[in-house]
Image (cartoon, helix red, strand yellow):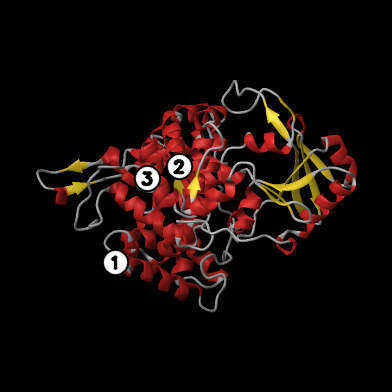
Amino acid sequence: MTGRPTEISVADVDTGALRVLRCLQAAGHKAVLAGGCVRDLLLGRVPVDWDIATDAAPDSVSSMFERTVSVGERFGIIRVLLDGSTYEVARFRVEGPYSDGRRPDHVKPADPRKDAERRDFTINGMFFDPEGDGLIDYVDGRRDLVAGVIRAVGDPAARFAEDGLRTLRAVRFATRLDFDIDAATWTALVAATSGIERISGERVRDELTRIWTSGGAARGLDLLLDAGLLQRVLPEVASMKGVDQPPEYHPEGDVWDHVKLMMGAVDELDDPSPTLAWGVLLHDIGKPSTFQAAGAGSSRIRFNGHDARGAEMVESIAGRLRFSNQDRDRIVALTAHHMRFRNVRDMRLSKLKRFLREEFFPELLELHRIDCQASHGLLDLYEFCREALVEATAGETQALRPPPLVTGRDLIAAGYEAGPRLGQILRWLEDEQLEGRLTTRDAALAAAKKLWT
């Protein structure tokens, strides 16, 4: 794979970024686009972030713009806010030792070449001056874009020792861009995997999420496993490799092969959500610990309770990687409920409607589709749920969650005592309403009275 870089023109540059550059240059400072946005422009992609490097001190940058935020003044970094967009402006710098393997002990101003030489990978070490010098490439980043190679700047062992997260970043760039990792860089990466254990859970989580959602997730899993990184950050996922499955349901292979196929399907989605991607990755995480083979022959393999066991494991993983409570709950739900589809045809209408209206159901249904396509290929239960959803909501926007015919307050006002019995009656009344057997307030009150007595 080659990057086939294009030429960049002023017209390709975000107007807000141009304003920041021009303002700094008009004040007599050197200012250039830096890092990932230059890489993406050369690849013909629209950059997500626009970073600017300059010789201006942070206080000078702050004085030039009306709205700024100091996010790393110790490192010479200021965020400039313009027209609803954010531009990160960093001073050219060199960095001191990384005693903790995460961040430099100190930084000091430097010239552009020295700044480029302290960056992680060559493709991220280029600068671009849209109205002056054009592309400024001290580290042969354009050469590696043409060759489709991820190569560390300078000594790869030193780059990975500085920040252990760079091992994950190398995998992310390789998968997102479909590039190869340079042999010397790969050797140093494999030797440096223990450094990831010094990185905070949040940073590891965010980097992994980008690998799962930026394209090439299945290849990313292979690279992480081959490097020994997966065994350190997600040993529960690594343990899925080699766990056999019954071939009549899973002709694709073991649990690892199944999940990799599913992650490949995630790559094909338009903008997959992080929780769906993590749900796909972790939904079968409980299979290795619940594996049972009754007698000889893999066709008698069972994973009884792997959904519940998996949900417990996801709780642990989410805590370790510092997920938000909301994201943790969603991924736990996707794991805990992914086996419920096998019972949908036998559910009472009220129970089915309760299932269909769960907040997590849209993502769960998509997970189920991907799950089926990566195994036996049968989509009958998926189609059944889609049709049930259409039928339940046809012409009625509140069909799955209709306003209650009576409330707890109504029943208490009618003389019923608060307590568990009242809650049971209210749930029964809602079930009858969902089933279509209760349609009026008077009928609901009469049914409640009969049930109570």
Q: In the rendered structure, which amino acid carries the disc numbered 1?
A: Leu
Q: Which of marks 3 and 1 is in front?
A: 3
Q: Position of residue 368 (x, y in %)?
A: 38, 60
Q: Is mark 3 on a helix, strand or loop?
A: helix
Q: Is residue 334 visible?
A: no
- Find disc 1 in the rendering and name its residue: 378
Marks 3 and 1, how far apart in space? 27 Å
Q: Which mark is residue 182?
A: 2
Q: Position of residue 370 (x, y in %)?
A: 38, 60
Tell me whether the residue at label 1 lies in contact with that at label 2, contact meaning CB atoms closer than 8 angstroms.
Answer: no
Q: Quarter of the image for the N terminus: give it.
A: bottom left
Say which quarter of the image contains residue 90: top right
Marks 2 and 3, how far apart in space? 16 Å
Residue plotted at (33% across, 42% down): 286
Q: Quarter of the image for the C terminus: give it.
A: bottom left
Does label 3 or label 1 sit earlier along the sequence? 3
Q: Where is residue 389 in the image (x, y as percent from the top left)?
A: 45, 70
- Find disc 3 in the rendering and name its residue: 222
Marks 1 and 2, how far apart in space? 41 Å
Q: Is residue 346 left or right of residue 366?
A: left
- Mark 2 neighbour class, 10 Å CA radius: few under 14, some 14 to 19, many 20 or more: some
In depth, the one of 418 and 382 nearer the eye is: 382
Say which quarter of the image contains residue 266: bottom left
Q: In this view, does 45 lie to the left or right of 78?
A: left
Please say if 253 is above or below 224: below
Q: What element carries label 2?
A: loop
Does label 1 or label 2 sit earlier along the sequence? 2
In depth, the one of 138 and 346 nearer the eye is: 138
Q: Position of residue 394 (x, y in %)?
A: 51, 77
Q: Is mark 1 on a helix, strand or loop?
A: loop
- Mark 1 neighbour class, 10 Å CA radius: few under 14, some 14 to 19, many 20 or more: some
